[in-house]
Amino acid sequence: MKLTFLGTGTSCGVPTIGCQCHTCTSSDPHDKRLRCSALIETDKTRILIDCGPDFREQIMPHPFRRIDAILITHAHYDHMGGMDDIRPYCQFGEINVYADPIARKGMLQMLPYCFAEHRYPGVPAIQLHEIHPHETFTIGDFRITPFQVMHHDLPILGYRISQGQKTLVYITDMKSIAPEEIPYSEQCDVLVLNALRPLPHHSHQTLDEAVSFAQHIAASQTWLIHSSHDMPRHDDVNRLLPSNIQMAFDGQVIDIA
């Protein structure tokens, strides 16, 4: 299983328009953070997690091959705003998109022309599937179990994704998680987890909260994502973190073998 971070930034991206802060003015490419999205793939199966407004820019450097499915974490624009750009991939056939009832409703509102009775030629060919926490399903080589976390008062999905004996857990935009949901993130080889900034936020984990959660579930390796320009520079943060908890960067590839 290969994991590629297409984007590791929060809703405004980094650098943020018009900002001259220490992070936004960094010349280090690790500090350029597009909106959050990731690819997981094997030789046979390719899955996109979220499809934000930077998708076209993110996917262009990668080989053009079929996308078997898209997993949506939640209905916010920075996680769904690039769905129209999947049109070239529809030449391989309909793309299966998986979302919970709230995100499904949001997609129907955002892209009504994709689901009209008489569709305009060339619109994305989407097969939209409604999924629910704890209901496991299979896509190609991957076994996937969604579970629920809270983005302030909005329930959203994290994903536990297994291939063979290896397991990836992907969580973004979490502020809190109910005790009964925590086991779905335990005993994983790789944890991907949101960490917005050092200072408190009402709907996102801070850096310290993310580190505490990662240590609580004892993930073998944790990669932090969904970071804003209020997060210090990539290398400065990583020097302060344990070696098994590090900030991810756009374009980073992780082999989970």
Image (cartoon, helix red, strand yellow):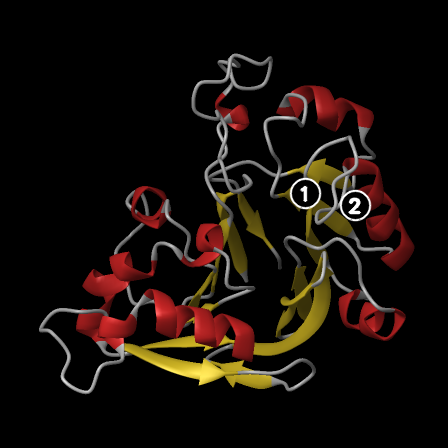
**Which residue sits at x=73%, y=28%?**
238
Pinpoint residue 143: horizontal percent, then vertical percent.
59, 79
Residue highlighted by disc 2? 210
Pinpoint residue 60: horizontal percent, then vertical percent.
28, 45
| 116 vs 76: above or below | below
Q: Residues within 10 Å of mark 2 (few under 14, many from 20)?
A: many
For numbered disc 2, what is the local secondary structure?
helix
C-alpha separation, residue under disc 2 versus residue under disc 1: 8 Å
**Which residue sits at x=83%, y=44%?**
209
Pinpoint residue 228: horizontal percent, then vertical percent.
60, 33
Q: Quadrant of the N terminus?
A: bottom right
When asked about the image quadrant of residue 66, the answer is: bottom left
Mark number displayed over residue 118: none
> Would residue 18 appear left or right of 158 to someone viewing this image?
left
Q: Which sits in the foreground, 19 or 158?
A: 19
Instruction: Specify which label sits upstream in the sequence, 2 or 1.
Output: 2
**Which residue sits at x=19%, y=87%?**
117
> Can the viewer see residue 248?
yes
Asked if marks 2 and 1 touch (Cβ < 8 Å), the reply is: yes
Pinpoint residue 222: horizontal percent, then vertical percent.
73, 48
Amino acid at circle 1: Leu
Mark number displayed over residue 224: 1
Amino acid at circle 2: Ala
